[in-house]
Amino acid sequence: MIGKVIGALLGREIDRRDGSGGAKGALLGAAAAGALRRTGPLGLALAGGYVAKKVLDRRRAARRRVV
């Protein structure tokens, strides 16, 4: 279940980077979730770290804009 959530977050990041929403991010996110299950705990930790870094970077950028 955690792998699916991380896959969805990765798909959302792909859509944001691409700029034109659609099925591309959803398909790649689903593929990422499948790949995470195959790589085991190490892949899950790496993907979770990537998502956490993106969230932290966004928060820092938002704080800079407000101040």
Image (cartoon, rainbow, N blue to C red):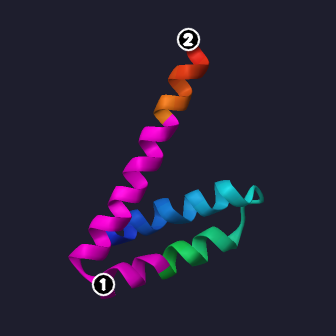
Our reading of the magenta stretch's main secondary structure is: helix
- Of all residues shown, which one is farthest toward the left? 41
Magenta residues, as a range? 32-58
| Residue 40 seen | yes
Mark 1 or 2, nearer chain start? 1
Q: Residues within 10 Å of mark 2 (few under 14, many from 20)?
A: few
Query: In this rendering, is residue 52 above or below 59?
Result: below
Residue shown at the point (33%, 66%) measured from the top left: 46
Judged left or right of residue 40, residue 5 is: right
Q: How many marks?
A: 2
- Of all residues shown, which one is farthest toward the bottom? 38
Query: In this rendering, is residue 67 above or below 23?
Result: above
Label 1 sits on what residue type?
Answer: Thr
Q: Quadrant of the C terminus?
A: top right
Question: Residue 6: x and y, percent?
Answer: 39, 64
The mark found on residue 50 in the picture is none
Q: Residues within 10 Å of mark 1 (few under 14, many from 20)?
A: few
Looking at the picture, tell me which residue is in the foreground, 42 or 3: 42
Looking at the picture, tell me which residue is in the foreground, 26 or 47: 47
Label 2 sits on what residue type?
Answer: Val
Q: How far apart in space, not on screen, are marks 1 and 2 (Cα)?
A: 42 Å
- Of all residues shown, which one is farthest toward the right? 20
Q: Which residue is mark 1?
A: 39
Judged left or right of residue 41, residue 16 is: right
- Is residue 53 inside the magenta stretch? yes
Question: Residue 4: x and y, percent?
Answer: 38, 70
Q: Which residue is mark 2?
A: 67
Query: In this rendering, is residue 60 above or below 35?
Result: above
Question: Residue 23: x and y, percent?
Answer: 68, 72
| Residue 1 seen | no
Q: Quadrant of residue 40?
A: bottom left
Judged left or right of residue 36, residue 41 is: left
